[in-house]
Image: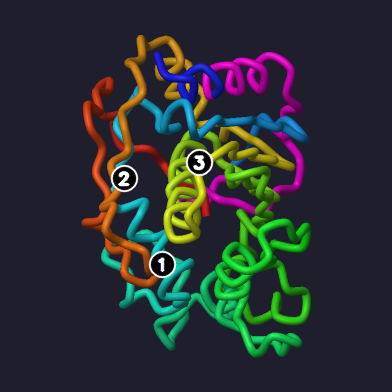
């Protein structure tokens, strides 16, 4: 069983055993049939993944790493908010008439500011500091821009990334305001682990820790039996992430630059209902 499996199981058991049940309260999310989507939730989960030891992807069930990386590149490399720039349809339900998700996610990362060293967007500033000022304690991004929230189809869930270099190791903290544990937990951990690997490779660094801070970690009411089944499974050893070693330019990474070696998983789950 991978470390990611162990952390996921411990998180879910803790939420189910000690979390706050929202049933009967006034909640925003709805199921497709219009019924309120209640959750059992836990405030303030903090998980640590040592990327130097293993790649943190769930093995209890398969995670579509190609689709996860495609969305990651859409946000963090293309810095796009247009759903046509994404190869999956996971954002279709959030798109407006203009075919975008508004001033959210990639749009925010693309916004430029003037520094003494020149003009940078949020991602390019990280890349600059990693190469030229790796001891900086100011390497962070923030997509939760209050000025633009009214123009976002969905407020960003994973909204802030902080990078920190210790010696030759690149560490990161991902801050997330809200997370659907069944649908999104391993998906987001996988994505940001890949992102740390990308930043490290093009900066001549080694990967260190990914710390994931979740303000509201929740399991939806209709997901509870699915989660109980999932965490009762036997997991497998973590696979190895293989990255094209010839890439030194962050903007040259593609979905095909990555592959997993020896990725064994449990069975695919039946269709998971999604609350919106």
Of 162 and 23, nearer the camera is 162
Q: Using the image as rendered, state which of residue 114 and residue 47 is in the foreground.
A: 114
Residue 27 point in image, percent of width and height: 70, 48
* Gap in angstroms between the C-alphas marked 1 and 3: 20 Å
Tell me if label 1 and label 2 are in contact, CB under 8 Å.
no
Q: Residue at x 66, y 29 (%)?
A: 40
The vertical placement of 53 against 91, above or below, is: above
Answer whether residue 36 is visible to the viewer in this image: no
Image disc number at residue 190: none
> Relative to 45, is 125 above or below?
below
Front-most of 38 and 107? 107
Q: Which residue is mark 3?
A: 189
- Point out residue 99 in the picture as x, y percentages from the top left corner: 40, 82
Left or right of 52, for residue 172: right
* Residue found 51% across the figure and 50% down from its top: 205
In primary-sequence order, the first of circles 1 and 2 is 2
Q: Label 2, on which residue?
A: 65
Regarding mark 2 in the picture, which secondary structure is present there? Answer: helix
């Amino acid at each position: 069983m991978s470390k990611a499996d162990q952390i996921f199981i411990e998180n879910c058991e803790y939420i189910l055993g000690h979390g706050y049940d929202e049933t009967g309260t006034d909640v925003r999310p709805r199921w497709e049939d219009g019924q309120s989507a209640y959750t059992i939730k836990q405030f303030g989960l903090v998980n640590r993944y040592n990327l130097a030891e293993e790649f943190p992807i769930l093995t209890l069930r398969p995670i579509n790493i190609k689709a996860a990386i495609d969305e990651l590149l859409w946000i963090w490399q293309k810095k796009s908010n247009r759903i046509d720039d994404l190869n999956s349809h996971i954002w279709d339900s959030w798109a407006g008439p203009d075919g975008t998700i508004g001033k959210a996610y990639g749009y925010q990362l693309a916004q430029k500011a003037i520094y003494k060293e020149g003009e940078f967007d949020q991602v390019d500033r990280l890349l600059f500091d990693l190469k030229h000022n790796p001891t900086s304690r100011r390497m962070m991004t923030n997509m939760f821009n209050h000025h633009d929230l009214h123009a976002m189809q969905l407020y960003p869930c994973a909204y802030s990334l902080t990078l920190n270099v210790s010696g030759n190791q690149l560490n990161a903290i991902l801050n997330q305001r809200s997370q659907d544990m069944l649908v999104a937990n391993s998906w987001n951990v996988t994505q940001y682990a890949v992102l740390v690997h990308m930043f490290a490779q093009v900066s001549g660094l080694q990967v260190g820790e990914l710390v994931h801070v979740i303000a509201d970690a929740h399991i939806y009411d209709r997901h509870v039996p699915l989660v109980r089944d999932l965490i009762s499974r036997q997991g497998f050893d973590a696979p190895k992430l293989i990255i094209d070693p010839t890439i030194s330019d962050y903007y040259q990474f593609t979905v095909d630059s990555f592959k997993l070696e020896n990725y064994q998983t449990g069975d695919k789950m039946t269709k998971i209902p999604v609350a919106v």
